[in-house]
Amino acid sequence: MTLIVNGEKIEDWQVRQEVERLRPSYEKTFADMPDKERQAQLLDWSRENVIEKVLVNQQAQNQSAQIPKAEVETAFTEIKNNCGGSEQLHKEFGTKDENEIKKHIELHMKVERLLQDVYKDISEPSEDDILKFYEKNKEQFKSAEQVKVAHIVKHINGATDEAAAYNGIRKTENELKKGAVFETLVTKYSDCPENGGDLGYITRGQMVEEFEDVVFNLGVNEISSLFRTRFGFHIAKLYDRKPSVLCALEEVRDDIVNKLREQMQRNAVDEFVDRLKSKAKIEEI
């Protein structure tokens, strides 16, 4: 089936390209949907996205004033430099024809100007909007729980096999049980004795899961039993804990304003595209 939008043919490769662009996040979001339905919906959404992009491009070409040649040349040079030269530039745009690339750049600049025109009448978020967003999304504005932790580690690597690492950490654990000072044993036995094994304050997601599962469940000044991660064997000590706290509205105001502004811009573009679609001639042949 071929799509024609206001007389412009949409090639199959354009839809396939959009399918592949959407697929990673789409497959994750709709993982529970039956595969056949998921693939059909992905194709439908991709077709709609391509149609909307074509409509916006057509409007930009028809409505926007010509971009001065000097501005296009400056943008071309900047993009080529950012790509690291002509070879990568040609790969990014799928062509060695630099005049064709400049046409793409000019069209993009026209689309940007068109969208700025769409945005121009959007008002700033009101205080009421900001407060409502804050109240509704408080979980987003909580600081992450932090723990200050140190560890004794015996690595498993080319120099030390699992048995040797385990025996080393067991010796450390036995000395701790007899009353030895943790910080002294760090210097004596750990493969990472720097700073007394101190890792500073960490939040979830910074360390491997096996490590976090242990240390985030320790009490202040509590020392863990020995445990295994993909890196080797550890004994950890927790020194301090900072609980998750809700940030004050003033601390996150700028973030909220930006989120609301982006939301209003998306809504404005959606309404604009809907108006274009209502007037467009879209054929399937």
Image (cartoon, rainbow, N blue to C red):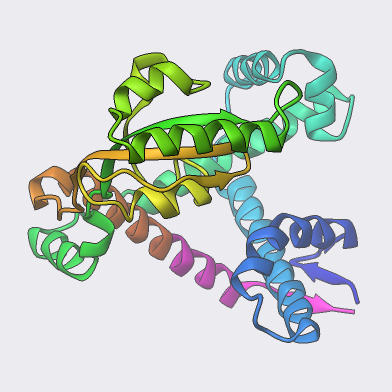
- Camera-side residue: 203 or 249? 203
Q: Please say if 92 is above or below 226.
A: above
- Camera-side residue: 174 or 274? 174
Which of the 4 image quarters holds residue 12?
A: bottom right
Whether residue 153 is visible, yes or no, is: yes
**Residue at image x 31%, y 43%?**
223
Quarter of the image where the N terminus is located: bottom right
Q: Is residue 256 left or right of residue 184?
A: left
Q: Is residue 156 left or right of residue 206?
A: right
Q: Is residue 211 magenta?
A: no
Q: Is residue 199 left or right of residue 76?
A: left
- Camera-side residue: 270 or 32? 32
How many numbered marks are there? 0
Whether residue 121 is visible, yes or no, is: no
Q: Is residue 209 left or right of residue 230?
A: left
Q: Please say if 241 is above or below 183.
A: below
How far across and down, in percent of the image, does residue 115 sit?
46, 48
Q: Please say if 207 is above or below 279.
A: above
Q: Residue furthest front?
A: 178
Magenta part mainly helix, strand or loop? helix
- Camera-side residue: 193 or 180? 180
Q: Please say if 220 is above or below 11.
A: above
Which of the 4 image quarters holds residue 121?
A: bottom left
How far across and down, in percent of the image, does residue 129 sit?
16, 64
**Residue at image x 28%, y 58%?**
140
Q: Is residue 284 magenta?
A: yes
Highlighted magenta segment, given as a residue range: 269-285
Which of the 4 image quarters holds residue 65?
A: top right
How far across and down, in percent of the image, does residue 32 sit?
65, 82
Quarter of the image where the C terminus is located: bottom right
**Residue at image x 65%, y 51%?**
57
How far across and down, in percent of the image, does residue 67 sit?
58, 28
